[in-house]
Image (cartoon, grey):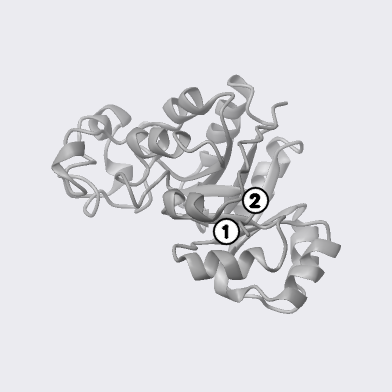
Amino acid sequence: MGIANPCCAHRGASGLAPENTLAAMKKALSFPFVEWIELDVQLSKDGVPVVIHDDTVNRTTDRKGRVADYTAAELASMDAGGWFSPEFRGEPVPTLEQVLELTAGKCRLNIELKTYGGRYPGMEAAVVGLLRRHGRTGDSVITSFDPLALRRVKEIEGRIRTGLIIDAAPPGLEQALARLGATFLSIGWNRLTADRMASYRQAGLTVMAWTVDRKAGMRQIAAMGEDIIICTNYPDRFGELQAGRKRRWFGR
């Protein structure tokens, strides 16, 4: 019997295309059961939200240095695909706005703010402003490891859902999220147990389990409830298990 959980493509379909590129987003959207795409946001030198995981460009482009030391135009001129495969050579570092335009009406977004300790002043306002401009406040969630960033998002726009990212399951986690006004929990998948999931469910939390790349792990998570969003680099593997679920896009 197949699994019926929602599927989230981690950094796009990043096992099949270079992570956090438009190519990875398009690949994710090619699977009809992908309901969510997770992506990472940093701020460029000129204050533009750009989609890249690391705070340097070293690992995923043909250049070196900090993301914050390049303008959005300079980042767009980099090769962010050739490291993955020659097929993707020339794929640029995209802006968040480009991803919003590409995915409009097609899926939900889990937008991770790659900040801590106020590293990117104005990031929260810049991201919220884009979501407002593109009408995406209702089908996106803003997540972060940084609770202060989540507080700032709520201060700017209380209607946007926020979520804490954590690779642990400390006592009182549900209460901590409630104090933040966060209703979304993005948690390392091997931290989940049936008892913990029952508690999170009782607290009214939407739970996303990351990053589940093996089919055995997907089955293990699915056994705890089909309401858990399974976040994976390999939506193709998920598709081999899923039970004919089609994309359910929840618009505003």
Mark 1 element type: loop
> Which residue does the image show at 79% across and 60% down from the upper left?
179
Quarter-wise, where is residue 51 in the image? top left
- Please indicate, yes or no, whether residue 188 appears anywhere in the rendered image: no
- Please indicate, yes or no, whether residue 240 appears anywhere in the rendered image: yes
Q: Is residue 137 above or below residue 222?
A: above
Residue 223 place in picture, x, y as percent = 67, 68
Q: Is residue 86 above or below residue 55?
A: above
Callouts 1 and 2 close, C-beta under 8 Å: yes
> Which residue does the image show at 33% across and 35% down from the upper left?
23
> Which residue carries the number 1 mark?
146
Left or right of residue 192, residue 114 in this image: left
> Which residue does the image show at 65% across and 50% down from the upper left?
150
Left or right of residue 138, residue 64 in this image: left
Residue 198 place in picture, x, y as percent = 80, 69
Left or right of residue 55, residue 198 in this image: right
Q: Amino acid at mark 1?
A: Asp
Label 1: few (<14), some (14–19) or many (≥20) C-alpha neighbours in 10 Å = some
Mark 2 element type: helix
Between 133 and 233, which is closer to the camera in this rendering? 233
Residue 46 place in picture, x, y as percent = 36, 31
User: How far is disc 1 from disc 2 in space, using C-alphas?
Assistant: 7 Å
Q: Which mark is residue 150?
A: 2
> Which residue does the image show at 56% across and 41% down from the upper left?
33
Between 88 and 97, which is closer to the camera in this rendering? 88
